[in-house]
Image: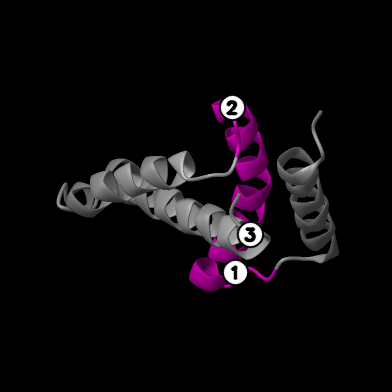
Amino acid sequence: MPSILTTGLIYFGAALAEIAGCFAFWAWLRQGHSAIWLAAGIPSLIVFAWLLTLAPAEHAGRAYAAYGGVYIVASLLWLWLTKGTVPDIWDMLGGGLALVAAAVILFAPRG
């Protein structure tokens, strides 16, 4: 079983790839950018899907559920870094709770 650090890197890499891929589609469809943005977006979404297969879970649904918590935090960081919107106390509390929930899903002892 991968370490907690390795698992965190897998999930944060997947979140970055998913956000970048989805943002490329958003930029193309909603902001009128060139379809060339899709040349980066599609491979990014492929990397996202591949990284999730590396998650240390016996069942895909459990891996996806735990990933959701990491995605929440990564999305708040994306908003902060790209739009300058600093997360408030409620964002941080919610993100922290989401990470705790993800850890419970991934690392709880199973019999």
Mark 1 or mark 3: which is in front? 3
Left or right of 88 in this view: 14: left
Indicate which disc, 2 or 1, sits on the residue closer to the N terminus: 2
Q: What's the magenta region?
A: 57-86
Name the amino acid type tagged 3. Answer: Ser
Mark 2 or 3, which is nearer the eye? 3
Whole-angstrom CA distance, mark 1 to mark 3, is 28 Å
Identify the residue position indicated by label 2 in the image: 59
Residue at 45% of width from left, 39% of height from top? 53
C-beta proximity under 8 Å, tags 2 and 1: no
Residue 85 is drawn in which quadrant?
Answer: bottom right
Which residue is drawn at the image coordinates 72% and 66% (left, top)? Answer: 87
Look at mark 1 in the image and give the residue it sits on.
80
The tag earlier along the polypeptide, 1 or 3, is 3
> Would residue 105 be visible to someone looking at this image?
yes
Which numbered dot is residue 3?
3
**What secondary structure is found at the residue carrying circle 2?**
loop
Q: Dot 3 lies on which element? A: loop
Residue at image coords 55%, 28%: 60
In this view, 58 is above or below 7: above
Q: In the rendered image of this protein, does residue 58 appear above or below residue 78? A: above
Q: Is residue 73 magenta?
A: yes
Work out whether mark 2 precedes mark 3 in sequence or the reverse, and give the earlier one: 3
Q: In the rendered image of this protein, does residue 4 appear above or below residue 48?
A: below
